[in-house]
Amino acid sequence: MGEEDTVNADQNSFAGGEEDSLLRNRHTSPLPPPPQQLSSKVLTLPTVLTLGRVAAVPILVATFYVDCWWGRTATTSIFIAAAITDWLDGYIARKMRLGSAFGAFLDPVADKLMVAATLILLCTKPMDYVVLGPVPWLVTVPSIAIIGREITMSAVREWAASQNGKLSEAVAVNSLGKWKTATQMIALTILLASRDSSFARLLPSGIGLLYVSAGLSIWSLVVYMRKIWRVLLKK
């Protein structure tokens, strides 16, 4: 074999080896994960937890008007359990891929029922503020802002869902809404707990957080409306 034949053979061998390497890499490269699909089951574990929150609302109302230490403790414990399951059902749905269309619909409904019921209950018994004394409107004002925002956003999201996809994206939950929910849950937990004389000193912080939550509620509503307005102007 001449020198030229040897060079050609080496080049063919290198080309063949490179092609084999590319084929092996093509077969061994990881495929992109499939898109997460909603479960076809109705009663998944996250949905059961959400239904538990809905069922807990009348129990919360009943224990709120039990004027003794265990009634106050039970009311606060029920609300704390509802707040924990609110996070837990979403975590389980994502990790175990147990999300369902029914659960996605029911979860915000359960949250709004629990929060609205708690706010209305607190409004029925004026809080005895340390400095100002009994002030009937102290909880009522932020409660109206929070509940009004939730009703408005529910109607806006339902309308956006019937329109194009850009409007639905404009009203998708953002970080501001998550901060609003977090401060709201902490504030209501403190206010329920402060009905017990042992935690009465926490009342000012609970009132303050409730007003912060009301402010975030209005702010997030304005942000959503601005996004919707921009989408409508581009049409």
Image (spheres, rainbow, N blue to C red):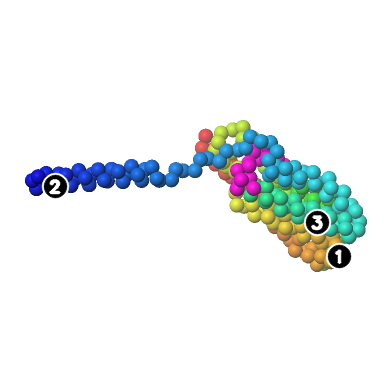
CB of mark 1 within 8 Å of CB of mark 3?
Answer: no
Work out whether residue 8 can be spotted.
Answer: yes
Q: Give the Cα separation between the discs numbered 1 and 3.
A: 14 Å
Which is more toward the observer, 152 or 107? 107
Name the amino acid type tagged 2: Val
Q: Looking at the rendering, which quadrant does residue 213 occupy?
A: bottom right
Vertical placement of 162 versus 170: above or below? above
**Which residue in the structure is indicated by mark 3?**
76
Q: Is residue 103 magenta?
A: yes
Which is more toward the observer, 23 or 95? 23
Q: Is residue 26 left or right of residue 92?
A: left
Seen at 75% across and 51% down, the residue is 82
**Which residue in the structure is indicated by mark 1?**
197
Seen at 72% across and 58% down, the residue is 186
Which of the marked residues, 3 or 2, is nearer the chain's N terminus? 2
Q: Is residue 166 magenta?
A: no
Residue 83 in the image, given as x and y percentages of width and height: 72, 52
Q: Dot 3: few (<14), some (14–19), or many (≥20) neighbours within 10 Å?
A: many
Seen at 27% across and 46% down, the residue is 18
**Which residue in the structure is indicated by mark 2?**
7
Q: Is residue 15 left or right of residue 166?
A: left
Can you name the residue that lies furthest to the right here? 67
Q: Secondary structure at mark 3?
A: helix
Residue 167 in the image, given as x and y percentages of width and height: 57, 38
Q: Secondary structure at mark 2?
A: helix
Name the amino acid type tagged 1: Ser
| Chain part drawn in magenta | 92-109
Q: What main secondary structure does the magenta stretch of the protein show?
A: helix
